[in-house]
């Protein structure tokens, strides 16, 4: 692997979030620290009439401007991140770029189009269905002129997006990059398919089902999120720094992880090399941690073999839900960035016997870097290394 030559750190200078807890990073942080899941019980939610626990972004959370939930959540997250970064000392450069990680795009708008027999509200209404359109609207609204991209690497999309942003900064294509991950796909039909696949659990409170690295875990609860971060090499008060990362693909199966875990471990090892750090430097594994047997086994193996079994482990999916695609990774990365800034990791409490290095509830941050792993269905892998902001 070609090593990345880092001249100055990439700072995470601003954060914005729309999650099942509500609009704003403070709603996310307070929700996680409370130890209560964002999911609520929705009656008669699934196509067969069954009730379902879902951490869904409801219409009443968002400003009503006539657009879809997806577009409004994306804009709210980006607006908050940009305002936050400016408050913390960031001034946008001349070429601000934008990259969005998403797995499925705007399902609400597609459903609306099909319900009307394929006829748009007006002759140009179908343009809103393109993943690029809400990004173009954000570029126009903010007067940005850097590169724009959408990335679809399912649940590894956030790591892909951060490394894309770093590449643009390195190559001079952008002076700053806004990274956002948006997936609002907890529709009854999609949720039912994941339940049928045997990985999602909707019939009980998430804490009774999703127990990453613990006995009795049945899988994950479903969530939705749009989370944005401002990446720059300028800015007075960043939350954290991106040191490096890596990507790989199992090339093995449409849904199952390669049981050898070879490519997951290579991705983690390459991320450490790219960041220029050693396994002993990693204090925390912010795991993909959906609570499925496959992911738990593979990440525990990677923790033991690549990280030498030392870092503390946590996953916030029992609380925030599995927000799929870009939403899950950006949410979880933002939690680590906020942890460095606030001195506490907002980890869920343990509810059963499990991995000896699993954190048990909110925990003070001590020394150590964070490795964030993400494993996307179909074999997509990403790992990135975060550090506290330089003092």
Image: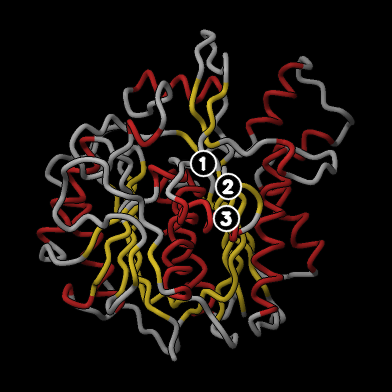
Q: Name the residue that disc number 1 marks.
A: 38
Image color mode: secondary structure
| Near-viewer residue (49 or 77) | 49
Badge 1 crowding class, 10 Å Cα cut-off, few under 14, some 14 to 19, many 20 or more, is: many
Residue 325: percent from the left, percent from the top?
47, 44
Badge 3 crowding class, 10 Å Cα cut-off, few under 14, some 14 to 19, many 20 or more, is: many
- For the residues labelled 2 and 3, the Cα–Cα distance comes to 8 Å
Q: Secondary structure at mark 2?
A: strand
- For the residues labelled 1 and 2, the Cα–Cα distance comes to 8 Å
Q: Is residue 144 left or right of residue 163?
A: right
* Sooner in the amino-acid sequence: mark 3 or mark 1: 1
Task: Say if residue 114 shows up in the picture.
Answer: yes
Badge 2 crowding class, 10 Å Cα cut-off, few under 14, some 14 to 19, many 20 or more, is: many
Whether 212 is drawn above or below 160: the answer is above
Q: Name the residue that disc number 3 marks.
A: 227
* Sooner in the amino-acid sequence: mark 2 or mark 3: 2
Q: Name the residue that disc number 2 marks.
A: 19
Q: Could you tell me if the residues under marks 1 and 2 are in contact, i.e. CB atoms within 8 Å?
A: yes
Q: Residue at x 76, y 20 (%)?
A: 118
* Sooner in the amino-acid sequence: mark 1 or mark 2: 2
User: Residue 276: which quarter of the image?
Assistant: bottom left
Q: Residue at x 33, y 31 (%)?
A: 208
Q: Could you tell me if the residues under marks 2 and 3 are in contact, i.e. CB atoms within 8 Å?
A: yes
- Mark closer to the observer (1, 2): 1
| Near-viewer residue (280 or 152) | 280
């Amino acid at each position: 692997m070609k090593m990345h030559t880092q001249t100055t750190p990439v700072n995470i200078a601003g954060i914005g979030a729309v999650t099942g807890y509500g609009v704003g990073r403070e709603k996310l942080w307070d929700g996680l620290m409370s130890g209560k899941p964002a999911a609520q019980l929705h009656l008669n939610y699934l196509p067969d009439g069954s009730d379902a626990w879902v951490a869904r972004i409801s219409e009443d959370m968002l400003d009503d401007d006539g657009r879809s939930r997806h577009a409004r959540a994306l804009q709210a997250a980006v607006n908050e991140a940009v305002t936050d970064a400016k408050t913390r000392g960031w001034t946008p450069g001349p070429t601000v770029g934008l990259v969005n990680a998403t797995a499925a795009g705007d399902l609400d708008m597609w459903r609306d189009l099909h319900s009307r027999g394929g006829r748009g509200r007006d002759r140009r209404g179908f343009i809103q269905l393109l993943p690029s359109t809400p990004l173009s609207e954000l570029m126009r609204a903010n007067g940005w002129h850097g590169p724009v991209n959408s990335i679809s690497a399912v649940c590894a999309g956030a790591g892909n997006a951060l490394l894309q942003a770093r590449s643009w900064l390195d190559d001079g294509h952008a002076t700053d990059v806004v990274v956002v991950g948006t997936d609002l796909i907890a529709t009854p039909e999609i949720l039912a398919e994941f339940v049928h696949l045997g990985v999602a659990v909707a019939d009980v409170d998430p804490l009774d089902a999703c127990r990453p690295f613990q006995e009795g875990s049945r899988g994950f609860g479903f969530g939705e999120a749009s989370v944005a971060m401002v990446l720059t090499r300028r800015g007075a008060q960043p939350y954290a720094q991106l040191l490096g990362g890596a990507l790989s693909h199992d090339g093995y199966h449409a849904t199952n992880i390669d049981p050898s875990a070879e490519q997951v471990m290579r991705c983690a090892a390459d991320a450490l090399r790219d960041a220029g750090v050693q396994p002993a430097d990693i204090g925390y594994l912010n795991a993909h941690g959906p609570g499925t047997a496959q992911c738990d086994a593979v990440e525990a193996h990677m923790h033991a073999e690549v990280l030498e079994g030392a870092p503390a482990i946590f996953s916030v999916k029992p609380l925030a839900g599995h927000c799929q695609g870009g939403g899950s990774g950006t949410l979880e990365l933002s939690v680590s960035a906020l942890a460095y800034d606030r001195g506490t990791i907002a980890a869920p409490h343990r509810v059963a016997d499990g991995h000896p290095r699993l954190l048990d509830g909110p925990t003070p941050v001590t020394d150590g870097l964070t490795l964030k792993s993400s494993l996307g269905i179909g074999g997509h892998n990403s790992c990135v290394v975060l550090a506290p902001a330089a003092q």
